[in-house]
Image: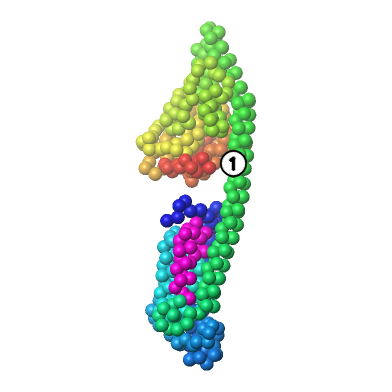
């Protein structure tokens, strides 16, 4: 077995290899099969009928020896045809089992040479198997197969008594065939490695540029958003500390602002850490409370979201059906963000409405429903258009989050003047797709 063979994968060179895999495995074998089977049968029949009769000197060059000795007529029987066919049948599996295919084609080629006086392109399948194994890095196996072929194929007629004289031209032709096959295979291997290396360098450069862009975005977020959120948190805390005589509703609003800004800072530091791919414990301005980073929000934080909305004066209720622990990954995160955006829209655009959040978790899907209705219903048929249906990025962002997990989302006004957001997301959300 070769130690640490160098393997050149076509996928490393051509990104569209997957779309052409079937043609590469089967389509490229068809010309080889035609050449080996039809070409060998034609060559053998021509030698047997036209030039192989005892020393008349006629016929093609492969039908007589270099020293003028005639050979017996060539008769290709069913077993010989079966060997020719078997040699090309295994070629479609050459990428998965290169050494096994090399051994099988070598055995069928030698078997044919021992069974029938070899003529024509009966080594076409072996040539393809040797080139493939060389490209896959199994050089010792190819060298062994080449040595065995050089030793057996030119001497088959002499060993079996079909000819009394060794054909030197056949030996030289066999050596030239092996040499050219290995040389061309090595040239192709070197070219493929160079192309793959250039692709790896380009990919590495793209990764470096993406990393630099993520760091730049993290820096901009830190310098702008984190600074503003820290000031909001600080000012709300100062107002609570100094405003002991403020009305209770005002103090509750200030407390809600302080707590919401603190949680936003925690999530912002988490996002900054992901962008930088480092620990973001020191990212962002300090919020004065020494809070630690929390994991990315999911459905387990919907109750906190509803409580903050209630503290801000919004009449909102939460109904949760099903096992929340069964939802994870990108689906969990996107479901929370959709509910968060919907509740935020109610707080911004319909503060006097009554809202209801319903989450139904089934075995395969998560159904989200956020509806708000005016306390005093408007006339039927006069829906409100106050929420941002055509401006802003709220609805667009929610729809993109649903599409990211192959889900669906619909949003629009209700007949009583409210607004309705409904989404259906699959339970399983894969991390690799989200990371991509």
Q: Which residues are magenta?
A: 130-154
Is residue 142 found inside the magenta-colored segment of the image? yes
Q: Quadrant of residue 239?
A: top right
Main SS class of the magenta portion in the image? helix
Residue 59 picture location, percent across and down: 54, 88
Compared with residue 7, is residue 388 higher up or lower down, i.e. above or below? above
Compared with residue 198, is residue 222 higher up or lower down, i.e. above or below? above
Q: Quadrant of residue 190?
A: bottom right
- Callout 1 crowding tier (Cα within 10 Å): few <14, some 14–19, many ≥20: few
The residue under the point 60% across, 18% down is: 231
Question: Disc 1 on helix, strand or loop?
Answer: helix
Nearest to the observer: residue 186 or residue 366: 186
Is residue 218 found inside the magenta-colored segment of the image? no
The residue under the point 49% across, 25% down is: 293
Residue 326 picture location, percent across and down: 38, 38
The residue under the point 53% across, 70% down is: 175
Residue 273 picture location, percent across and down: 54, 30
Nearest to the observer: residue 19 or residue 252: 19
Mark 1 highlights which residue?
207
Residue 219 picture location, percent across and down: 62, 29
Nearest to the observer: residue 83 or residue 52: 52
Give the colour scheme of this rendering.
rainbow
């Amino acid at each position: 077995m070769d130690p640490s063979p160098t393997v050149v994968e076509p996928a490393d060179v051509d990104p569209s290899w997957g779309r052409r895999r079937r043609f590469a495995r089967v389509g490229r074998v068809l010309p080889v099969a035609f050449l080996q089977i039809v070409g060998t049968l034609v060559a053998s029949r021509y030698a047997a009928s036209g030039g192989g009769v005892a020393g008349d000197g006629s016929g093609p060059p492969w039908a007589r020896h270099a020293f003028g000795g005639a050979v017996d007529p060539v008769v290709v029987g069913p077993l010989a045809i079966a060997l020719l066919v078997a040699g090309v049948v295994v070629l479609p599996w050459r990428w998965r089992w290169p050494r096994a295919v090399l051994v099988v084609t070598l055995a069928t080629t030698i078997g044919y040479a021992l069974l029938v006086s070899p003529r024509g392109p009966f080594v076409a399948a072996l040539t393809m198997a040797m080139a493939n194994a060389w490209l896959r890095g199994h050089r010792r196996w190819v060298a062994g197969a080449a040595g065995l072929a050089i030793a057996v194929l030119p001497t088959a007629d002499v060993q079996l008594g079909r000819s009394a004289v060794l054909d030197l031209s056949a030996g030289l032709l066999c050596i030239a065939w092996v040499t050219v096959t290995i040389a061309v295979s090595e040239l192709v291997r070197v070219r493929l490695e160079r192309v793959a290396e250039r692709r790896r360098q380009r990919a590495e450069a793209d990764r470096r540029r993406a990393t630099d862009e993520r760091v730049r975005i993290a820096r901009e977020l830190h310098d702008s958003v984190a600074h503003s959120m820290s000031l909001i948190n600080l000012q709300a805390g100062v107002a609570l500390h100094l405003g002991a005589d403020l009305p209770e509703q005002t103090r509750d609003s200030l407390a809600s602002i302080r707590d919401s800004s603190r949680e936003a800072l925690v999530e912002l530091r988490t996002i900054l850490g992901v962008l930088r791919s480092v620990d973001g414990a020191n990212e962002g301005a300090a919020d004065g409370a020494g809070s630690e980073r929390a994991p990315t929000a999911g459905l387990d934080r919907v109750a906190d979201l509803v409580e903050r909305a209630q503290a801000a004066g919004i009449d909102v209720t939460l109904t949760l059906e099903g096992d929340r622990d069964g939802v994870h990954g990108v689906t969990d995160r996107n479901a929370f963000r959709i509910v968060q955006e919907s509740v935020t829209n109610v707080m911004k655009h319909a503060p006097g409405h009554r809202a209801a959040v319903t989450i139904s978790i089934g075995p395969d899907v998560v159904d989200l429903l956020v509806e708000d209705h005016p306390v005093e219903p408007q006339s039927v048929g006069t829906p409100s258009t106050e929420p941002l249906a055509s401006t802003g990025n709220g609805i667009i962002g929610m729809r993109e989050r649903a599409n990211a997990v192959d889900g669906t989302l619909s949003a629009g006004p209700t007949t009583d003047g409210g607004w309705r957001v409904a989404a259906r997301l699959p339970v399983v959300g894969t991390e690799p797709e989200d990371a991509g």
